[in-house]
Image (tube, rainbow, N blue to C red):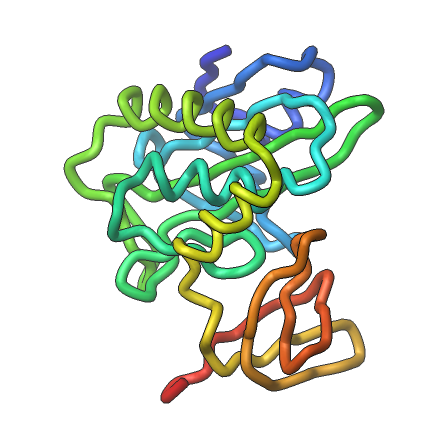
Amino acid sequence: MRLGTVSSTQDEARSLPIGSIVVAEEQTAGRGRLDRTWVAPPGSSLLATFVIAPHPLASLAAGVAAAEACGPPVKLKWPNDLLRNGAKLGGILVEGQSGKQLVGIGINLTSAPPGAARLEGTERDDLLARLQAELATWLACPYAEMLQRWRERSDTLGRRVRVELPGDTREGIAEDIGEDGALIVDGIPVHAGDVVHLHGA
């Protein structure tokens, strides 16, 4: 489904069956994790939501798929940011619903906020086609294989990070990700939170 201006592709996809894809030119109330807003000029980004069957590691699988679709320079920041040269290129938002999940992916193409990155010279429809194929591949493959590819694409592992949690902040080395997708920081699994890559790490 291709739309013009919408509140968000996630909202438009809520009533659609598994297998549906919503692509929009512009979002007036696009959002990321932690209720952050996602703003992009009309036609300047790939803004899509994929309706999938429930998957316990959907966020990480979608990250791998998006990084693969974007190309080798793109890295992953736990849990769901796409980075290019250390700057944010895009993001992923997975929301659960009864019997399905909504995987929202936004990638900057011809425009980006200050300090963010963009994927210059990329046709949106070409990227969408690659993303659709990669998402199908990585959602269907064995979890261990997908997690290993996430590690290979990671810009977080091996770094000193600060994890900001509600009412708590923790610093340490991001050592690995667990089988459940948790980030292991100094031996302690972190299942949710905002990760900051610390300079000099």
Res. 15 image quadrant = top right
The relative height of residue 25 versus residue 191 in the rendered view (above or below) is above
Which residue: 40% across, 55% down? Answer: 152
Q: Which residue occupies the extreme bottom position in the image?
A: 200
In which quadrant is the C terminus drawn?
Answer: bottom left
Which residue: 81% across, 22% down? Answer: 99
Which residue: 76% across, 34% down? Answer: 96
Q: Position of residue 43 (x, y in %)?
A: 32, 29
Res. 123 image quadrant = top left
The relative height of residue 30 versus residue 52 in the rendered view (above or below) is below
Would residue 121 be found to the left or right of residue 156 on screen? left
The relative height of residue 109 versus residue 52 in the rendered view (above or below) is below
Q: Position of residue 57 (x, y in %)?
A: 66, 42
Q: Nearer the viewer, residue 30 or 18?
A: 18
Would residue 168 be found to the left or right of residue 22 on screen? right
Res. 107 image quadrant = top left
Q: Position of residue 190 (x, y in %)?
A: 71, 68
Q: Position of residue 79 (x, y in %)?
A: 58, 56
Q: Which residue occupies the extreme left position in the image?
A: 121
Which residue: 66% across, 59% down? Answer: 178
